[in-house]
Amino acid sequence: MIAVGALLHTKHLSRSVFEITIALVVPVVQASLAVYLFRAGTEPHRMLEAAVGAGLMGVWSSVLFGSGGAIQNQRWQGTLEMLMLAPRPAVLVILPITLATGLTGTYAVAATLLWGWLLYGIPLDFARPLAFAVAVPGCILALGMFGLLLAATFVLMRNANALTNTLEYPIWLVSGMLVPISVLPGWTGPIAAVLPTTWGARAVRQAVTGGAVWPSLGICLAVSVLCLGLGTLALTYVERRARAAATLALA
Amino acid sequence: MISALRLIGLGGAIAYRALFNWTTPAMFVGTLLAGPLFQLLFFAYLGRQLGVADDRFYIVGNAVLAASLACVFGGTMAVANERRYGTLGHVLLSPRSRTVLFLGRALPYAANGLLVAAVTLAGGALLLRLRVPLAALPGLALALAAGSLACAFFGLLLGALGLRFKDVWLVSNVAVAVLLLLTGVNVPAQTLPAGLRAIGSLLPITHAAEAARVLAAGDGLAAAMPSIGRELAVAGAYAVAAATLLRLFEVESRRRATLDTL
Amino acid sequence: MTGTAIEADDLRRTYRTRTGWLRPRRTEIPAVRGVSFTVRRGELFGLLGPNGAGKTTVIKMLNTLLIPTAGTARVCGFDVVAATREVRKRIGYVFGGDRGLYERLSALDNLRYFAELYGVPARQQRGRISEVLDLVGLAGRERERVEGYSRGMRQRLHIARGLLHSPQVLFLDEPSIGVDPVAARELRRTVANLAATGTTVLLTTHYMAEAEELCDRIAVIAGGRIRALGTADELKHHADGRRVLEVEAYGVPDDRLTAIRALPGVREASLETVGTGHLLRVQSDANSDLQHHVLGALSGIRLGRVSTRQPTLEDAYVAIVNS
């Protein structure tokens, strides 16, 4: 059932001209950004890593705006109340949406790498290609589950958009998708450690440069499952609160 | 003359409150203040890591760029949101000058952008410990103002396009991404290929950022004036383009019923 | 100063549409095909017609939002194409229903903005705004945000906005749609008062009773042309010499309706859904008694009340539109 829902929502997302064009343009911009910066800087050999990092940034954007947007869209359409009142657990309704956002995010990774190769001649030589092929979907699955936790919080907030706009860069930064965590102040370490994005990015990066992929991927998925659990609990609690505070219908 | 000023001032302010989507405190702080600050931090750390340019380059540049979000989206909302509320027809029934009406709407957003840029600059400088010479502040204010103005008129132009064609938010989102890449704020202009650099020099922000960097380095207002002048020229060009396009679309709509007027 | 407020002379408007992307097909849709009429100053003029008849297009041409493809129009003596700004200074337009207002702002702010836009002199704005708020009965609620307004309140705010700059000509588009009967009656009283004080009003409506009550003269427009023009009484003559048979029936299939229409002596037959059943109206010549034949055509169908009466304005309207 979750699979069916996820596919449906992916199709829905892919039909919107807006989403498609954003999905086409943004990877180009981010790939270019990464390429020019890394080329100009002191580490030109790390272009592939940069491209992959940029792709992951795209996945996060997709999940963030997708999950937040999904709830907000439902609210504006007036269907959020319907969703919450449905006899099925809210999780089963919302998880497909967030998974779909992760799936479209796959496109971001692929597109960034493709553009990087086509436009800038970045060679696609992964240190561990098989591991890469597993790590990326794993990462995406994890982010989809994380998206559920996000969506749960957004249900309660009137203006989820404010948070979505704010969380893009911080997560990119703290998870070390493009900037290694080592250069950040020490106190960001613990925060990074509990984010599935950090571990997912690390797993993928290790697949590119060579290193222990499976531990990182394992932790990533474990944290995500935890997020899924938290998200499910949160949804139940949130749904009750929203009904009490009458914020479900407020747009 | 006075009545034109009233239309610009009072009218602009009311339109700002009516059409800007981000006026609630949560949205304002989250989207316009926290967001750009995080963006600044992201690129500053990235820049440090890659050794592409120093902190000052990234902090000052991103502060100027911070205005772009408020101004580009704001300018777009100032025009395109009329469609959302169904008020375009009522506005076009006004006997007053379209140019004054719409250009006046850009001003509150430019002021908004200036505020955002100033806060981002202050925040970035504090967090990353950058010292900005006090004498440079007036000049910086001027540079930020010029950049915000250019961005707001740019946004207005996009909004005009959005009135006529659908999917305006697509264009604004792409525009903001393009500004990120081509304004020489995160990727130094010299490292961009000549073609992209040329496009960048026609975009808002580029020259204002250049001027701001010069000022922050302590080189004095005289050294920055040429860039500020260029930015103001860019602002003027977009203002003219926006006004022209709006009038064009209105005329076309009267002939061919193309705008969503009623 | 001419005594004519609105002059329409052979107004025509064609819409050109393009369908298809690679090989576009252009079609021309004539929405208005030669409409002419004059409205005197202070007159309350009604424009009646079915959906798609061209009413809105005619109004849009008169209030300068559209340029006619042919023909001319003058409002208060000014040509709508050549002297657009002058026309806009003198007209008000009320339409919009639920939309057309800035939701996030209060009624007061909306009025302030449009007062500025419509050129109300700064010194007079405050006074004028309270005047119109009083006139439409919104005084005391003007500081609330429009997003919380009911449909009736919004309609009243639309009217208030239309009157801000004391226009000489007011275009009212379906003012009572979606408004409850009590509020609608108040609206009609306001409109009647307006006309009494010298404002020329052009009203479009679906409600016959409203048109009959308010309008000095009525034009019936259908298929882009004016089919009839005159006072309500004059229009009723179109159904003169007719009788109207009304039958309550429960479930009248199309073939029976066709059969009834084919009966000799029947001018019109229409079916209206009322509650759980239908109301069949048959217009016939006064001297033919068709009750027997009609009831025969309805055999096997459960019937309710059967009555005969003189035609009303609505019947005349149906007759005009279907001729």
Image (cartoon, coloured by chain):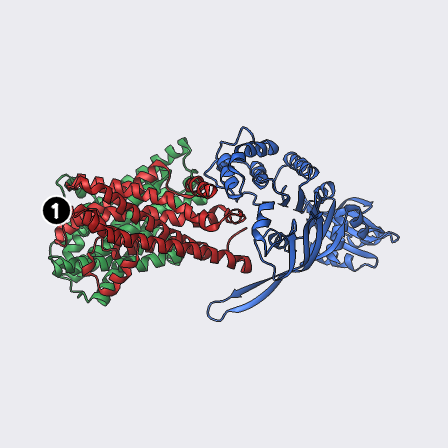
Chain colours: A green, B red, C blue
Q: Name the quadrant containing residue B11.
A: top left
| Vertical comparison of A49 with A90: above or below | below
Between B89 and B140, the one lying in front of the other is B140
Q: Which residue matches tag 1?
A: A183
| Residue B43 visible at all | no
Tell me the crowding category of disc 1: few under 14, some 14 to 19, or many 20 or more residues within 10 angstroms, Cα based.
Answer: few
Tally the marks: 1
Q: Name the quadrant containing residue B181.
A: bottom left
| Residue C227 visible at all | yes
Between C275 and C1, the one lying in front of the other is C1
Image position of B35 (left or right of B108): left
| Vertical comparison of A149 with A129: above or below | above
Image position of C31 (left or right of A250): right
Between A119 and C285, the one lying in front of the other is A119
Please, which chain is the residue tagged with disc 1 on?
A: A
Image position of C179 (left or right of A190): right
Q: Name the quadrant containing residue A119.
A: bottom left
Looking at the image, which residue sits at the far top?
C140
Circle 1 — which element? helix
Q: Position of residue C203 (x, y in %)?
A: 66, 46
Q: Position of residue B83 (x, y in %)?
A: 47, 49
Looking at the image, which residue sits at the far right?
C287
The amino acid marked with disc number 1 is Val
| Vertical comparison of C24 with A106: above or below | below
Give the residue at x 33% y 50%.
B151
Q: Position of residue C211 (x, y in %)?
A: 71, 44
Q: Position of residue C182 (x, y in %)?
A: 65, 34
